Amino acid sequence: VFNFSAGPATLPEPVLRQAAEEMLDWHGSGMSVMEMSHRGKEFIAIHAEAEKLLRELMAIPANYKVLFLQGGAIGQNAFVPMNLLRGKAGADYVNTGEWSKKSLKEAGKYCSVNVAASAEAGHFTSVPKQDSWKLDPNAAYVHICSNETIGGVEYHWTPDTGSVPLVADMSSNILSRPVDVSRYGLIYGGAQKNIGPSGLTIVIVRDDLIGQALPITPSAFDLKTQADNDSMYNTPPTYAIYIAGLTFQWLKSNGGLAAMEVHNRAKAALLYDYLDSSSFYRNPVAREDRSLMNVPFKLRDDALDAAFLKGAEERGMLQLKGHRSVGGMRASIYNAMPVDGVKALVAYMKEFEASHG
Ligand code: PLP
């Protein structure tokens, strides 16, 4: 089957096969990774290798810490202000859709939130151009969601926030293409789209931003506590870290992030080109801001949605139903989605249009 779920999402088949092979006995240890102590030499090696590979893939500079935490991206919506306010009263947020709205609402519990720009008036179909942003020079940081998983809107440029640290929720496009980590103060993301099982949250943070958490910050989510303990202040999500490491290895053997970008652009182009050539289907997002990862689309008549989904499922194409807040369809085409999956979807869309258009 081809699984178009927005997350938890499809993983590379070789990763799952290797995990299955090693499930009962990892490298002759006689143990499953799930059964290992996080303080034992086997797991410490797995953890270190995962971090090394992630650093290599993303070319993470030495003055950044890589943390493997729990709590999800939604947890980070609170942990970011708790950790990064550094004595400042407020932070800037750019509102590009459902996920950034959640982030700024949560931050409002801890600081004053300045919505520096919002795409709400245009129903979240674009990223506001930076010259329209009203940044506060005293903000503790500027927060963006680099890819809105529900709306299918993605930044294809990096905002310039001067000396104010840029913070990005990269949950749904991390590792889909190269990014210049040095342009960010902190990057976070849940693992369940491009990386591995849910339950693992990746945080990449510049050293100098660590160490001034609000006193109310839970110890397990104080970046300093976790950085000082190599993400092992408490038991980390060990199995998810192991699978993440296998995915990182798969990415490396497939040419790294530059190759992933080529692969992802090719898949997205197949789908958007067809959507644009058809009057039966429609994607509302401004062309230059369209997501390479999540492609929402509507049928001309939403009374046909159920028939479309049923036919897709019969052909082994799963989870195409759009998010409940927007309706229609959504095809999530993360790294692990092969080009054949997108070709099969486009072929089915053409067939459906021919019989119902
Ligand atoms: N941010 C984005 C962009 C997402 O797509 C998601 C969905 O998983 C989340 C945040 C929420 O992440 P979590 O459920 O891991 O807290």
Image (cartoon, grey):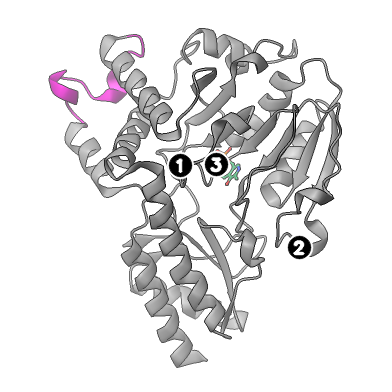
Q: Secondary structure at mark 3?
A: loop
Q: Is residue 113 visible?
A: yes
Quadrant observed for ligand 1 in the rendered image: top right
Q: Quadrant of residue 4?
A: bottom left
Q: Nearer the viewer, mark 3 or mark 1?
A: 1
Whole-angstrom CA distance, mark 2 to mark 1, is 27 Å
Pointer 2 local density, CA inside 10 Å: few below 14, some 14–19, many at least 20 = few
Magenta span: predominant SS is loop
Return the residue at label 3. 171
For the residue marked with disc 1, what is the amino acid?
Leu
Query: Quick check: 315 above or below 78?
Result: below
In x, y percent, where is residue 288?
A: 63, 62
Q: In screen coordinates, is 84 left or right of 40?
A: right
Q: Is mark 3 within 8 Å of ligand 1?
A: yes
Which numbered disc covers residue 123?
2
In x, y percent, where is residue 5?
A: 46, 56
Q: In screen coordinates, is 171 left or right of 288?
A: left
Magenta stretch encompasses residue 35? yes
Magenta residues (range): 23-39
In x, y percent, where is residue 42?
A: 26, 15
Q: In screen coordinates, is 17 left or right of 327?
A: left
In x, y percent, where is residue 151?
A: 64, 58
Badge 2 or badge 3: first in the primary sequence:
2
Q: Secondary structure at mark 1?
A: loop
Whole-angstrom CA distance, mark 3 to mark 1, is 10 Å
For the residue marked with disc 2, what is the amino acid?
His
Residue at figure coordinates x 77%, y 16% from the top left: 86
